[in-house]
Amino acid sequence: MSETVEKKDPARDEWYAVGISADLRPGEARETILVGEPIDIRREPGGAVIVSKSDGRACPVRERYGHVWTSIGAPDHDLFAIPEADQEGRVLVDVGAVRVRCSPLRAVENFLDIAHFPYVHTDILGAEPQTEVVPYKVHVEEAGDEVWATKVKFFQPQAAKSAEGGIVTDYKYRVPAPTTAILYKTCPPRPGEWDVITIFVQPIAEDLCDVWPWMALFDEDNSLAELIHFQQMIFLQDRSILENQVPKLLPLDPKMEIPTRADMTSVAYRRWLKRRGMTYGAQTAAA
């Protein structure tokens, strides 16, 4: 009699942001859920962060990009690099969590979508009648196994808190991990540099997640509170759209949703997830 072997879910072996480092003071602890499992996060009096499962087993820990990162499995890779985090003169902005009742993969895909700007972020990131998404480039960077979209351009009435008036904004998108997306975009006060805006998504369940936006900007005019408020406003506009998407889970079967030219990044992201065997938060076949 053959023995059935359950296929391991690769979601367990990824790194996830689960809290803001500065909010966890020595002696403090908090509880949360990661990929369906309760975990305990605490900072020891000496400063070290300890993450453990409900059975007491320790989880790996990193503190990077203003957040505590952990995994309920055993990652065979280190946390991805964001070199701009160490660049002198940047303002590093920990925005805080936004709870969203959607698949964590849906949250990432929405962040990668350019076409919704004029309709969801009207008169900020886009405006009618300038709704066309001009052709851009998408590829998988083999060295790091990352999805990249480049040569993206879009007219935006207010591309950033630091922007004055509408500009055609240059974008680059990077997906270094299944639940992380990084946006590099035109930096209005410092031409030649890129503003860096990210979302780190913490899967709580397959249809529930906390989204932790984080930014590395050049901005000498706006306060930290103003930058946080601007980014929270943008993401809260997305939340109502995300929570009403059908199906709730992200379809990986290309027959389930018909893509358009503007969806090239989404198509590449879904194929990349499917190749990696990432099914947590995904719908792999028509219901």
Image (cartoon, grey):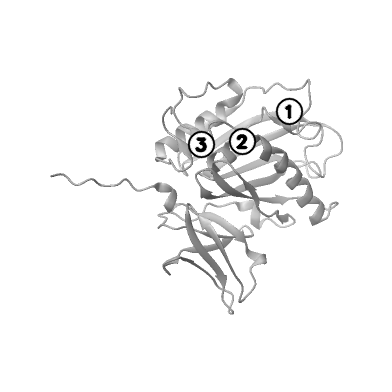
In the picture, residue 122 is in which quadrant?
A: top right
Query: Which residue, given by chain and number where applicable, does mark 1 sit on?
Result: 119
| Above or below for 2 versus 167 | below
Residue 110 numbered mark, or none: 2
**Mark sitting earlier along the chain (1/2):** 2
Q: Is residue 142 left or right of residue 1?
A: right
Residue ID at (43%, 52%)? 12
Quarter holding the C terminus is top left
Quarter holding the N terminus is top left
Q: Under tag 3, what secondary structure?
A: loop
Residues at discs 2 and 3 in contact (Cβ within 8 Å): no
| Above or below for 108 versus 11 | above
Residue ID at (45%, 22%)? 255
The x and y percentages for residue 119 are: 73, 28
Q: Amino acid at mark 3?
A: Leu
For label 2, the crowd category at 10 Å Cα-Cα, with few meaning under 14, some 14 to 19 and many 20 or more, is some
**Residue 219 appears anywhere in the view:** no
For label 3, the crowd category at 10 Å Cα-Cα, with few meaning under 14, some 14 to 19 and many 20 or more, is many
Q: Amino acid at mark 1?
A: Tyr
Q: Amino acid at mark 2?
A: Asn
In the picture, residue 151 is in which quadrant?
A: top right
The x and y percentages for residue 234 are: 74, 41
Q: Is residue 145 left or right of residue 163?
A: left
Q: Under tag 1, what secondary structure?
A: helix
Question: Which numbered disc, 1 or 3, marks the residue closer to the eye?
Answer: 3
Residues at discs 1 and 2 in contact (Cβ within 8 Å): no
Residue 251 numbered mark, or none: none
Query: Which residue, given by chain and number where applicable, does mark 3 sit on?
Result: 249
| Above or below for 24 versus 257 | below
The x and y percentages for residue 125 are: 76, 34
Q: Is residue 221 left or right of residue 177?
A: right
**Mark sitting earlier along the chain (2/3):** 2
